[in-house]
Amino acid sequence: MGRGPTIVDVARRAGVSKGAVSFALNDRPGVAPQTRDRILAAARDLGWQPSTRARALSRSRAFAVGLVMRRAPELLGADPFFPQFLAGVESVLAERGSALVLQVVGDDDQAEAASYRRLAGQGRVDGVFLNDMLVDDHRFGLLAGLGLPAVAVGRPAGPCPFPVVTVDDRQGVAGTVAHLLGLGHRRVGFVGGPEGYVHSRSRRAAWRQTLEAAGVAPGPELVADFTGPGGAAATRALLELADPPTAIVYANDAMAIAGMGVAIGLGLEVPGDLSVAGFDDVPLAAHVAPPLTTVRQDAMAWGRAAAEVLLAVSEGREGRPTADVELPPATPVFRASTGPPRPE
Amino acid sequence: MGRGPTIVDVARRAGVSKGAVSFALNDRPGVAPQTRDRILAAARDLGWQPSTRARALSRSRAFAVGLVMRRAPELLGADPFFPQFLAGVESVLAERGSALVLQVVGDDDQAEAASYRRLAGQGRVDGVFLNDMLVDDHRFGLLAGLGLPAVAVGRPAGPCPFPVVTVDDRQGVAGTVAHLLGLGHRRVGFVGGPEGYVHSRSRRAAWRQTLEAAGVAPGPELVADFTGPGGAAATRALLELADPPTAIVYANDAMAIAGMGVAIGLGLEVPGDLSVAGFDDVPLAAHVAPPLTTVRQDAMAWGRAAAEVLLAVSEGREGRPTADVELPPATPVFRASTGPPRPE
DNA sequence: TTTCCATGCTAAACCGGTTTATGGGATGGG
DNA sequence: CCCATCCCATAAACCGGTTTAGCATGGAAA
């Protein structure tokens, strides 16, 4: 089984006790420089790496953090945020010696709660990321009860017992809407995400407020589910209205691209007959026809920041609360899917 | 720190030794049914879950498996395979009490090797998934040397020391090409992935062989990089040829959708002037305009099967080799992006 | 009755690190 | 010259499970 060398082998080779090896490795005072070098050399020679299993037990730390993805599997594939966020997280964890434990659960309260309970109860992780913030987030209470440190990825709707790492998505949407207004649009519709999500709310609010601030009545709006089929259905419904919008802002790119597909399928021209804007800047957004106007956020940077904060809070002294982090806001990216409306 | 109850608390409450608790929990013989019930009741009352940290140390097992994603971060986001595969993996791991440790490294040999060395050396995982099989895969030797069990996700090019879980992607591509031939195409081009990948090769071989078997000369082909920009550039190049293809088969959907965008941007009609086919059936494929003909593979099933095999090989007796698994082949999905060529 | 064995449980060793209590040798001050 | 201090290093306890060796007990076989 564990065929690798252990700390005892290193100690023997360096002619010291295993305690000394431990001290040298974690460079604590109380080891003569010369001895320390000898120990490190022995460790290098043997190719020894301390067993995370043993360290985890004796230090009462997991040296790992968790991410529970609650998402229907088919939705997972469409979301570009997730993998990029992970990449950012990993870049920080790797250099700090922590690992990422990933759980994927379906869209199910029970399964999600059980997942957190396992992670905490079995001591698998030192903390967790809370993504996809909900308007009334039941996870806060659960995690607080479990005593599991966490970081909120995104602005919580209410008071939150954990540090928060946010990116303002409203400015991006506002910029897009302002752009459409500047092009001359006066009927700007909106296709949002499910009401339960905080980011669904904030993107919709940004759309509405920008229009109202400009003295333009908000166009028709619908709630969809962030998926292609959902966006397509919503688009069809909006275009069938007696007074259809000349532009539609979507809460994500998947719905926007599908919506564009519907419009084109109906023989409309984009952006001639309908301007379309998304959110996320998925890798394909720049390459569909026409290229999609959208909003870009730096998911990797978000992941890095969240990981920093989570490590701090899970290692840190209980007393000193970790400060929240506000990252640069998401910015609009204007492409050919938005243009002036056809003069009536 | 570890504020939860321990096995000693359970033992005390049930009035037995901690050995007895361990026996009862892992239902081993040698515990009277009545005693067993008493122990389990005590555990339930206290809400005790055995510490994975302690179990990992004493059993010399990590109760976790690893997945090292070697991928440029921006490419990660575009790949629908990855999250769906993860969902499948997780569904199996969760019920077997294992966790998934995810590492993300850039496209860098050194970083990748270091990642595997850490996972193995620190005893973080009991085995790893090997995805994106390479034509000459240096990971085989590395992992064999580390003594780390593994499962190959996809058909290796040469002899492989690990069990293999495959999905035949050639039939899907062959079906697509046959479909194009049936529609009357005689100049069918191909945009492939980097040569190093086995699946790049096999998809290209399927394209070529299907054409040759039908007595049609393979159309022009190019190597791209699986990204949207790469696919767009290759498409532009193919369309600028003196005798451009009437149909292009792409090795994935990202390149196909971007290629379609280029064609439409040039004023061509799809499929009138150019038929386009992809591979993967990303969630958006059905919703772009026109909907994309592609090849679907069941990534979740693949993940499930790979996880089953990996757990078997990492738990299993050394002697008995685990059998390879061949999943149902990928199947073509015909949509509106392919149609008869314009008569000359 | 004695022998034998199966059953049910306990005590203790063990996994491989970390950490605390302790000991020994050199140093320095009085 | 002796004792108080450091400085280094060691032995042993500890983290929380698993596993082995061994000890009662009771019933069946001889």
Image (cartoon, coloured by chain):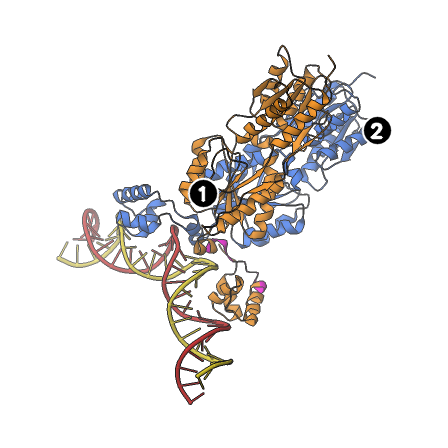
Chain colours: A orange, B blue, C yellow, D red
In front: A209, or B205? A209
Label 1 in the same subunit as label 2: no
**Does the magenta run of residues contain A315?**
no
Q: Is residue A171 visible?
A: yes
**Secondary structure under badge 1?**
helix
Q: Which mark is residue A119?
A: 1
Residue at 45% across / 43% down in the picture?
A119
Residue lying farthest top?
Answer: A242
Q: Given the image, on which type of amino acid does mark 2 rest? A: Glu
Q: Chain of mark 1?
A: A
Residue B320 visible in the picture: no
Q: Please state the horizontal and vertical placement of residue B9, each as a whole percent of the image.
A: 31, 49
Residue at image position (81%, 16%) is B343
Vertical comparison of A44 with B86: above or below: below
Q: Position of residue B44 (x, y in %)?
A: 32, 41
Q: Is residue A111 above or below residue A308?
A: above
C-alpha separation, residue under disc 1 versus residue under disc 2 = 56 Å
Return the mark for residue B337: none
Quadrant of image for the C terminus of chain B: top right
Provide the residue designation for mark 2. Answer: B240
| Residue B285 lies in quadrant | top right
Residue B207 location, quadrant: top right
x and y percentages locating residue B311 in the rendered image? 50, 43
Chain under disc 2: B
> Looking at numbered disc 1 in the image, what kind of residue is underneath it?
Leu
Q: Which residues are magenta?
A: A44-54
> Could you say where residue B33 lies in the image, as x and y percent from the top left?
27, 42
